[in-house]
Amino acid sequence: MSSARTAVITGACSGLGAAAATRLAADGVNVVTLDLADGADLHVDVSDAHAVRDAAGRIGPVDILINSAGIVGPNAPLWEIPLDGWEQTFAVNVRGTFNTCQAFAPGMRDRGWGRIVNIASMAGKDGNPNMSPYSASKAAVIALTKSLGKELATSGVLVNAIAPAVIETPMNAGTGPEALAHITSLIPMRRVGRPEEVAELIAWLVSDKVSFSTGAVYDISGGRATY
């Protein structure tokens, strides 16, 4: 991969975003980190379209976009989910992905090369119990990816999603113990994934080695995925 390429990674200060940042930097990619946490290159709330557009203007041309910013949201039966919890989960997970794609994809299209990887979840395919906001939001990310992939299919910009099962990240520390135990029990390998394992898949998806895949969903689930 050319060292001249620039990647923007959201949610890059922890979990999968941090692992992806480390992995791409090892490939010589210039990584720009967006997060609300300390240590980010730019402090950006991805749910704020104006903030994202401002960041895009400051960063300049970008070749790679990895949407890793996300929240689990409330853990409860659907009928007990507070409306603000539902809306906040969608604001970060779906609107955030929309905002960054809208800000960065046109430049990639104009330059004739780009790679976008949206981090979805197995929950978006299977629907985890007591996690309806998260499950529904990640299903939306999958559909957005498929739609955008088709729109950019002849442009040189590839848009794909990954659907991890449970990965050992700080985000899952906030998942209720019962919900976490249930979704871990669904993994045939009988362990959770490691961030660096997911980062390896991301590194491949944003490289020149991928040339005939767009609008696709790549499972990384220890065998949980069945379709």
Image: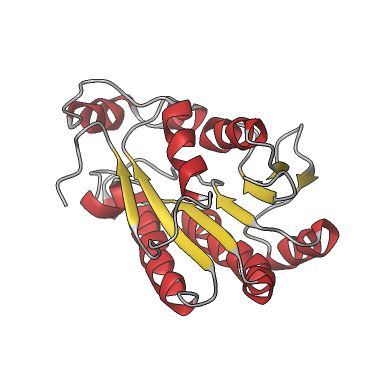
In the rendered view of the protein, which quadrant contains the N terminus?
Answer: top right
What residue lies at 27% left-to-right and 20% top-to-bottom?
191
Check the image and name the residue furthest to the top.
191
What residue lies at 47% left-to-right and 43% top-to-bottom?
204
Q: Quadrant of residue 217?
A: bottom left
What residue lies at 53% left-to-right and 49% top-to-bottom?
207
Q: Is residue 123 left or right of residue 82?
A: left
Q: Quadrant of residue 64?
A: bottom right
Residue 88 in sight here: no
Residue 128 in sight here: yes
> Vertically, is 144 above or below 190?
below
Q: Quadrant of residue 220?
A: top left
The residue nearer to you, when weighing 65 against 190, is 65
Q: Is residue 57 left or right of residue 161?
A: right
What residue lies at 46% left-to-right and 72% top-to-bottom?
148
The residue nearer to you, when weighing 133 against 213, is 213
The percent coordinates of residue 178 (x first, y second) are 26, 27
The percent coordinates of residue 7 (x first, y second) are 67, 49
The percent coordinates of residue 117 (x first, y second) are 50, 53
The percent coordinates of residue 105 (x first, y second) are 62, 69
Picture mark count? 0
Q: Is residue 193 left or right of residue 190?
A: right
Q: How is the image coloured?
A: secondary structure
The residue nearer to you, when weighing 2 against 89, is 2
